[in-house]
Amino acid sequence: MPHRDQEISLLRDELEMLMGERQLLLQIVGAAASLIAGLDSKRLPVAAVEAADLVSTRINRLPEETLQDALQAVHAEIEERGVEAH
């Protein structure tokens, strides 16, 4: 049984590490979504608009629930005309 307990402990540690990484990734995605929502593409260089489009395209592939988790992780809501921070 000690071997099984050790495996369970290792799996628990791995799961905790993955959950921590998920939370950090949610914060990054939430911050990126908030930043992009607040940009005025008419005032940005073309390269910046292209980069923002690349990021927003990837963010839009996320399930709605995950995006909401990401926005909550940074306490932001995306509105039609920009970002509202709480």
Image (cartoon, rainbow, N blue to C red):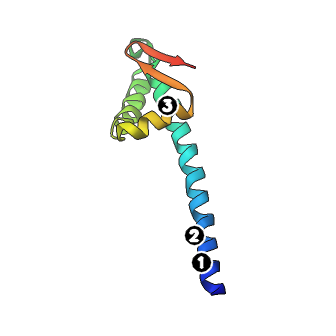
What residue is shown with label 1? Answer: 7
Rendered position, 76 above or below 65: above
Label for residue 11?
A: 2
Mark 1 and mark 2 in contact? Answer it, CB < 8 Å. Answer: yes
Question: What residue is shown at x 45% (from left), y 18% (from top)?
Answer: 39
- Please, is residue 8 above or below residue 28 in the view? below
Q: Position of residue 29 (x, y in %)?
A: 49, 37
Q: Give the residue type that dot 3 points to.
A: Leu
Q: Could you tell me residue 42's position as x and y percent?
A: 39, 12
Mark 2–mark 3 distance (CA, rounded to whole Å): 29 Å
- Image check: 37 left or right of 16? left
Identify the residue shown where x is 46% and y is 29%.
33
Which label belongs to residue 71?
3
Alpha carbon distance from label 1 to label 2? 6 Å
- Decide which of 6, 71 is in the foreground and name it: 6
* Quarter of image, res 78: top left
Is the N terminus in the top left, top right, bottom left or bottom right quadrant?
Answer: bottom right
